[in-house]
Amino acid sequence: MNVRFFDVLMRSQAASKILNDVGENKLSHAYMIIGADRTALDSLFDIIGCAVFCKNGICLKCPECLRVLNRNHGDVIHIEPNP
C-alpha cells in the first residue's frame, strides 16, 4: 500500500472513528461506510483488519498484517458486491 495513500486514509473520519473504537476495545458489530472509490474502501477495510489483528499497531509488515493485506486471514471475510 502506498504510504501517502495510507496516511490520507488514516486521517479520514471513518478510519478515525473505527480505529478509536479498536483502541478502546469497543469495536461494534457493524459499521456502514459508503464511498464511490472502491480502492479507498478496500484499503480502509484492510487497515481496519490490520488494526484489529496486528500486535504492533498497524505495521503492514507482520504475518498478521500480511495475511489481512493478501486476503488470506482466516478471520477476515471479503464480500464482493454484485456487478
Image (cartoon, helix red, strand yellow):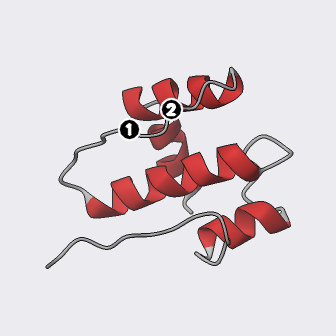
Residue found 48% across the figure and 39% down from its top? 29
Q: Which of 60 and 51 is in front in this view?
A: 51
Residue 80 image offset from top left, x and y in percent? 31, 73
Identify which amino acid the numbered label 2 is placed on.
Ser
Residue 53 image offset from top left, x and y in percent? 74, 51
- 7 vs 61: above or below: above
Farthest residue toward the left? Answer: 83
Residue found 68% across the figure and 20% down from its top? 24
Q: Is mark 2 on a helix, strand or loop?
A: loop
- 46 vs 56: above or below: below
- Image quadrant in which the N terminus is located: bottom right
- Tell me whether circle 2 and circle 1 mark residues in contact (CB < 8 Å): yes
Please identify the quarter of the rendering in which residue 60 is found.
Answer: bottom right
> Looking at the rendered structure, which numbered label has been put on residue 28?
2
Residue 56 image offset from top left, x and y in percent? 85, 44
Q: CA separation, marks 2 and 1? A: 7 Å
Please identify the quarter of the rendering in which residue 32 is found.
Answer: top left
> Looking at the rendered structure, which numbered label has been put on residue 54?
none
Residue found 17% across the figure and 76% down from its top? 82
> Looking at the rendered structure, which numbered label has been put on residue 31?
1
Q: In this view, does 51 lie to the left or right of 82?
A: right
- Image quadrant in which the C terminus is located: bottom left
Residue 66 image offset from top left, x and y in percent? 72, 69
Q: Is mark 1 on a helix, strand or loop?
A: loop
Q: Nearer the viewer, residue 64 or 2?
A: 64
- 72 vs 13: above or below: below
Q: In this view, does 52 lie to the left or right of 47?
A: right
Identify which amino acid the numbered label 1 is placed on.
Tyr
Farthest residue toward the front? Answer: 29
Q: Residues within 10 Å of mark 2 (few under 14, many from 20)?
A: few
